[in-house]
Amino acid sequence: MSIIQQIVKLQGIDSKLQEIEELLGDLPGKVDNLKLQESELIKSVTDGKVRIKELELELNKFDSQMDDYNVKIDKHKDQLFLVTTNKQYDALQREIDHLKSELDEIETKSLEFTEEKEHLEKRVISEEENLENLSNDLIIRRKKLEVIMSESSKEKSKLELEKENKRLQIDSKTLSNYDLIQNARQGLSVVNVNGSACGGCGAFVPPQIISEVRAQKGTQTCDSCSRFLYWETI
Ligand SMILES: [Zn+2]
């Protein structure tokens, strides 16, 4: 096997390894993101339920306070018929007005709390639905990821072994060039010649170089992008 054929084989292995990385791609990231959304939703549902309980307690308190105020106001109103002087009457009336304004305040707060509670109840219901969908989605994606990971890790170890063996067959100078181009050219170090152009960057390749490429004499590289050149029939 000529040196360029060895390089082409190594490139094939490296490309397959890259494909595996791409296949895994952002799936783990997506699963992490779903987990984060899930925990945020769980927290929001829990907080919402705690607040609803607090509001219920407060609303019960308001109810009994409002009952008390209404009883007091009724009592004072009854007393209005029993007073004998205007002064007493005015004092009672002021007391009634005072009680009424306090009752008003409690009623307003009670309304605000009731609205907040209704709003929260709706939010919790919709969040619980989202949570269910999200959890199902998460389970599916996790399973998918596990399958891909286990299949790919087998394939990956096989390819890594092949890669190691292949690298042992190539001289260190060529290998270090190969690695440099791999890093500089997004993992593609070897390209074929298209007519009289480099298959990587499209630059012109002189006929003399092409004939050497075809003859598989040592290694030839593109002057422009430095990639190794090979003839398609390899
Ligand atoms: Zn090129």
Image (cartoon, rainbow, N blue to C red):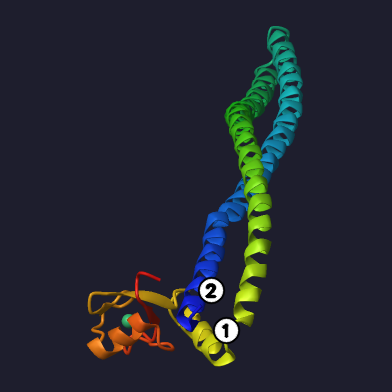
86 and 200: which is toward the camera? 200
**Which amino acid does the dot numbered 2 rest on?**
Leu
Q: Is residue 83 visible?
A: no
At 71% from the left edge and 8% from the top edge, which residue is drawn?
Answer: 78
Q: Which residue is mark 2?
A: 10
Q: Is residue 96 left or right of residue 4?
A: right
Q: Secondary structure at mark 2?
A: helix
Kindly identify the residue that appears in the image at 65 percent across and 52 percent down: 149
Residue 70 in which image quadrant = top right
Identify the element where label 1 is drawn. loop
What residue lies at 40% left-to-right and 71% top-to-bottom?
Answer: 234
* Residues at marks 1 and 2, CA–CA distance in whole angstroms: 9 Å
Q: Position of residue 20 (x, y in %)?
A: 56, 59
x, y percent for residue 45: 67, 36
For residue 50, above or below residue 33: above
Proximity of marks 1 and 2: CB atoms separated by less than 8 Å: yes
